[in-house]
Image (cartoon, rainbow, N blue to C red):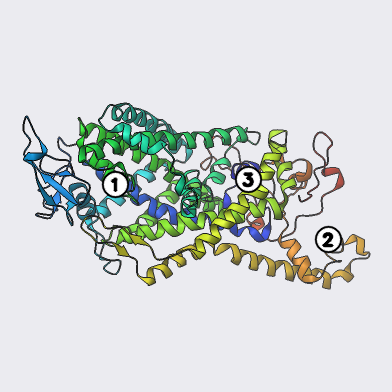
Amino acid sequence: MELALGQFTSRGPATGFVLAKGWQGVGFAMVINSILGTLYYNVIIAWALFYFILSFRKTLLWSDCGHWWNTKDLCYVPGSSGNILTGNGTALNCTLGANLSLSECQETNTTGKVTAAEEFFYRLLLNKSASFDDFGVPGTYMSVLLLGAWLIICLCIFRGVQSSGKVAYFTSIFPYIVLLVLIIFSSTLEGSGQGIRYYIVPRWNLIGNFEIWQAAASQVFFSLSISFGSLIAYSAANDFHNKFFQQMCIVVSCDCFTGVFAGFAVFATIGFLATSSGVDVDTYARSSGPGLAFITYPQALARMPASPFFSIIFFLMLLALGLGSQFASTDVPITALMEFFPSYAKRRSLLVVITCTIYYLVSLPFACPGGIYLFELFQEYTANISLVFIGFFEVITVTYIYGFNRFMNDVKMMLGRRAAQYYLFVTLCITAPLLALIITVTNIIGTRPLTIDAAGGFPHYEFPRWSTILGWFIFVCCILPIPIVFVISYIREYRKIAAQRAAKGNFGDDNDSPVANNFEEKPLYLAALTANNSPADYWGPRRRKHQTGAYAHLAAKSTVHDISAQQQFPKRSITAMNNTDIGAGTTNPTFDPDLTKNDDGESVLDEKF
């Protein structure tokens, strides 16, 4: 649906979501959600960059104790010659020999001890504080890493698609090569079969756990970048007749395949780690948050032969995946600014530098000792809750307010047919809004204070009450444009229609008045609501050559002028709207009957489903 909207209008989410004037706030909400999501997601890239740089060593720093950041007598390495875990909070202190037997080991308690990988992540990289209240000031390592991450993104999107498009080949293909190498190698390691078995054998007792379904829905939204606005912004550069439906099927299939494919690489390695450490796979498989990618997996990589090599390619893969996502989300607010202010397109490079600089400065709180708590808060309230909430309003706006029939007519203009209309009717009109509503409501009702499991020598921590208020403030910031834009647009329409009715006497005949035709039979408040739910007068294809049929009135407008958008979408010719059109709040005029037919002579009247 987002691909269709972007391709049809050749606009980003901020200006393209005017198929219902009062609901343009949905597009603004996407932009804000993209901004907030970009802030915390780049922290993950900074972490991966740190591990990647320090992987160029003969011995990985998280593979042993004895460093200045390790705590004396508390740090240990699971499965090493000195510590073989038994899975019950104890370890066997052994001296390895040619004929090692358990009788030669002495059992000691490991409760309260910390692995070397945990201390590397929490104490060296994050310099984690004991609580959210003890927030601190930005640390040197994280500040420099965030600066490096934003510099990389700035350089990659500096020239728009010309630069980021070339990098995208690497960020899209390289991860598959790494995953294939990791699967082949890890499958030869002892215990990999146990990890894969844990991965593919379903646990049916968890199917009734609604939290799992909530997490799955959030993951689908996040992995496909739904409700971030990046799909609309990037599809705006497509050719008007591009076969986006086939591309959508390919992208969704590849996303699903990649998730399953990556699971084999991860769980085969976890199985090896569990076996070499003498514990169940479940001990490591239940790692939550950043623990799996930055503690458990590095710990397993350190145990592999040629561990520096595998560490380098693994974290380079994480960098590629993270950067590929960041290119799109960083471009969303830049695209919005250039659409509202077309003159900025000539200074895109400067705009990119300014945007990335602001992003870096605003993201510095994540570099503080308490930044990990802020990270968890952003992840919960921007990625898990707001995405599904915005997605609900997005589907409702397109299918019920704008109308499913109109939407499919627009699809037919691009593809020449109403592609998979019965499938889309079931999913967009019934399944998607129903599931999104249920997940959103249960998310809101079932919200409880966030917690962080005990790790890195830090005890189990429950976030303070004020942090929950902060989390809901973040959520409200994401969705606030939806009601604000609706109310402002409604007031504008109400005043306009009231003025038109007051001036009705200026018309010789009621039938000559567009007000009489559209709104005279309705009460003022209802007429304003109808106008608020109707498309803006510039809704439709942006490129003049595609403004045919029901949208022929757009080509006839003398106020619409062409501008160059080569810097925004290279090798594309895009017609920009007049600045005065944006947010003008005028009603889409009644279509001429001769213009409501397509090239085949069929009616394309804007009926609602």
Amino acid type shown at disc 2: Asn
Query: Which label belongs to residue 518?
Result: 2
Vertical relation: 487 (above or below) 603: below
User: Is label 3 in a helix, a strand or a loop?
Assistant: helix
Picture coordinates of residue 171, whole percent (x, y): 40, 35
Could you tell me which residue is drawn at 60 percent across and 47 percent down?
11
Picture coordinates of residue 85, whole percent (x, y): 18, 45
Q: Nearer the viewer, residue 474 or 96?
A: 96
The residue carrying mark 3 is 5
Query: Which label belongs to residue 428?
Result: none
Rendered image quadrant of residue 37: bottom left
- In the image, 495: left or right of 362? right
User: Is label 1 in a helix, a strand or a loop?
Assistant: helix
Rendered image quadrant of residue 62: top left
Whether residue 112 can be seen here = yes
Query: Which label belongs to residue 283?
Result: 1
Work out how far the residue at label 1 is from the one at label 2, CA to CA, in angstroms.
66 Å
Could you tell me which residue is drawn at 83 percent across and 61 percent down?
518
Could you tell me which residue is drawn at 29 percent across and 30 percent down?
186
Could you tell me which residue is drawn at 27 percent across and 66 percent down?
131
- In the image, 123: left or right of 157? left
Mark 1 vs mark 2: in front:
1
Amino acid type shown at disc 1: Thr
